[in-house]
Image: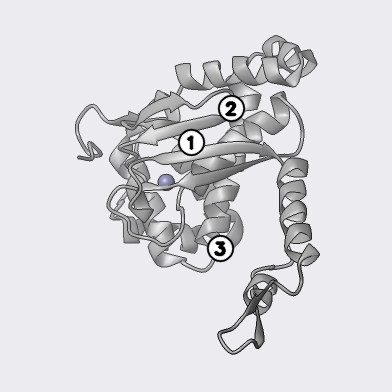
Amino acid sequence: MPVAGTPLARIGPNAILQLLAVLEARGGPRLCERVMSRAGIASLPDCSTMIDECIAVSLHHAVRAELSESAEDILREAGERTAAYILAHRIPPLAQRILKILPPPLSARLLSGAITRHAWTFAGSAGFRTLGPYGFELTRNPFAHGAVSDQALCGWHAAVFAGLYNALVSAAFDCTETSCIAQGDPSCRFELTRKYDKEQRQSDGVRRRLSAPFGNRQTGPTGSTRTSGLPRDIGTYDGT
Ligand SMILES: [Zn+2]
């Protein structure tokens, strides 16, 4: 059961401050007011300390409801800004320098440990654990609980993870949400991969498909042959 809205469910203020900054940049104060109204937020809470998680969850849901076309981009941009804020204000420069010069596998392990220790600031009441140095899992994620979608919704979290890994482990990391509570999965899971590896996997997949362009030739009951696989296989290549 979600615990959003319970008296003890609190989260870092960047969950709303960075999102409002993106809305302001894109649509000015009127867009902020429109989304806040949709979220039922009459006025901003005191953001000098942790805030009621319920306010952040409502604002994220309101962005999706009010701005469905651009909601994913907006939430990702807010996540990128949150990562930038954490780098500027929450991780000491010396620690950042050390992480950057260590071999990536080691800095990834150290960074994932640090993220876990501070998860309460951005995961709120969700359960949080690492899935190795390049993966994270949120159970009871209040930002996804209650939403129903055919795609993963937690782009804000993914962008926070990607921003931190790109800055401190190695450039060009992507973070993909591989399962999401909003899709009916038991938890929200995030996987960090180097963009090169991801592109290479996609390229390998395309190459495999194209290497057998005529699919499997099968002999029918009358001795005729038919070709299966070609339209479907080529059709799945989306050019990415
Ligand atoms: Zn999710």
Disc with the residue nearer the chain's start (3 vs 1): 1
Disc 3 versus disc 1: distance between alpha carbons? Answer: 19 Å
Label 2 is placed on what type of residue? Ile
Are the residues at dot 2 and dot 1 in contact (C-beta closer than 8 Å)?
A: yes
Q: Residue at x 49, y 27 (%)?
A: 131
| 42 w.r.t. 84: above or below | below
Residue 82 image point, x, y percent: 56, 36
Residue 14, numbered label: 1
Find disc 3 in the rendering and name its residue: 27
Find disc 2 in the rendering and name its residue: 86
Q: Is residue 84 visible?
A: no
| 84 w.r.t. 109: above or below | below
Q: Residue at x 31, y 31 (%)?
A: 125
Label 3 is placed on what type of residue? Gly
Position of 94 with respect to 5 (left or right) is right
Q: Residue at x 41, y 51 (%)?
A: 60
